[in-house]
Image: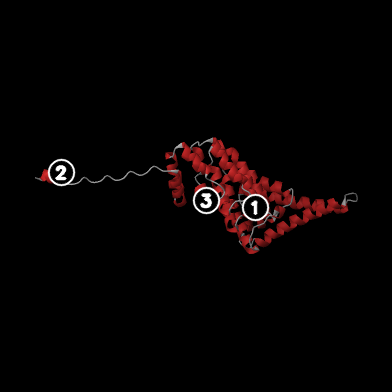
């Protein structure tokens, strides 16, 4: 009897098998959880990987762009890889979120695609003036991580010095008080980075020395004073500042006494001396407004 009852009971329905991922489903998941989406990429067929890669652009959500290194590591078609690189680089402007996303992923690009880093780095640095002020410290931090990789540290540091030093009219798009806070946070990132990576500290000193050959900025002075907190580089960092101040004043005095020097060169020497003086004074003035980390170097070295 029991056997008859058991036979008459309906069998339990089996649980439905999950559908295989598609390019669209991976993108939907990436909007919520990029890490989970990246784990599914290896289950996609080559055509879906190529379609997914080709869908990325400067207008893509940052969470979607995070998939780029993993997509490239799965060896999609060269045409799809070339297409996404061209799409990103040829876009005249990027949203601030895209700048941050691309800066974050560059150090994770597979070795076969590291040749693209200089082009993307140049693009990011050229678009810094368009970035939202609140994103600049995070952008600088990601670029410093790239430099510590090390991937093109001199280009990274030269670009940061040029932008935050106000070269070519570049400036932070914010009221002066906010701009000082942004620069102060970036300086803290630089200070932390050079303490963690002595090789980067050496690159910073060299980059500022090259930058000082044009016109020393207050930001560059503050960067050097931050580096000077690392005992190993104290003498070199402070030495660059001393040389800049000494040489600019010497050239200015010499130009004033020289009878045959053209007026344009005399004016250039005067402007150089004034620039160095203003940079040093600006750093001292702002050291009490959120840049207290440079005070010990000012007291000890200047």
Q: Which element carries disc 2, helix, strand or loop? A: helix
Question: Which label's residue is closer to the chain start, 1 or 2?
Answer: 2
Nearest to the observer: residue 170 or residue 58: 58
Residue that appears at 53% across and 42% down = 54
- Where does residue 42 sit, x and y in percent of width and height? 44, 39
Identify whether 133 is placed above or below 40.
below
Query: Where, quadrant-wise, is the C terminus in this rendering?
Result: bottom right
Q: Which residue is mark 3?
A: 62
> Relative to residue 70, is residue 141 depicted above or below?
below
Q: Quadrant of residue 78?
A: top right
How many neighbours does mark 3 have within 10 angstroms: few (below 14), some (14-19), or many (20 or more)? many
Looking at the image, residue 162 sits to the left or right of residue 82; the answer is right
- Disc 1 vs disc 3: which is toward the camera? 3
Residue carrying label 1: 223
Question: Label 2, on which residue?
Answer: 7
Q: CA distance from mark 2 to mark 3?
A: 56 Å
276 relative to 16 in the view: left or right: right
| Numbered disc in front, either 2 or 3 | 2
Q: State which tag comes first along the sequence, 1 or 3.
A: 3
């Amino acid at each position: 009897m029991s056997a008859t009852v058991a036979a008459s009971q309906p069998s339990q329905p089996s649980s439905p098998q999950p559908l295989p991922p598609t390019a669209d489903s991976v993108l939907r998941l990436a909007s919520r959880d990029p890490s989970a989406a990246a784990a599914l990429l290896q289950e996609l067929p080559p055509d879906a990987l190529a379609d997914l890669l080709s869908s990325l652009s400067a207008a893509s959500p940052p969470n979607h762009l995070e998939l780029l290194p993993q997509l490239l590591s799965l060896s999609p078609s060269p045409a799809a890889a070339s297409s996404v690189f061209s799409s990103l680089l040829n876009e005249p402007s990027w949203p601030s979120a895209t700048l941050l996303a691309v800066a974050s992923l560059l150090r994770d690009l597979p070795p076969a695609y590291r040749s693209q880093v200089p082009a993307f780095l140049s693009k990011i640095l050229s678009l810094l003036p368009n970035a939202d002020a609140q994103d600049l410290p995070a952008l600088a931090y990601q670029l410093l991580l790239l430099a510590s990789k090390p991937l093109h540290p001199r280009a990274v540091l030269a670009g940061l010095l040029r932008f935050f030093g106000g070269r070519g009219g570049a400036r932070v798009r914010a009221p002066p008080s906010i701009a000082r806070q942004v620069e102060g946070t970036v300086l803290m990132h630089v200070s932390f980075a050079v303490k963690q990576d002595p090789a980067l500290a050496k690159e910073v000193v060299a980059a500022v020395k090259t930058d000082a050959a044009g016109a020393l900025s207050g930001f560059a002075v503050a960067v050097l004073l931050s580096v000077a907190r690392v005992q190993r580089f104290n003498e070199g960092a402070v030495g660059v500042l001393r040389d800049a101040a000494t040489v600019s004043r010497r050239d200015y005095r010499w130009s004033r006494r020289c009878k045959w020097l053209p007026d344009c060169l005399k004016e250039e020497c005067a402007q150089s001396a004034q620039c160095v003086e203003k940079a040093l004074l600006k750093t001292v003035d702002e050291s009490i407004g959120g840049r207290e980390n440079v005070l010990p170097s000012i007291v000890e070295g200047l």
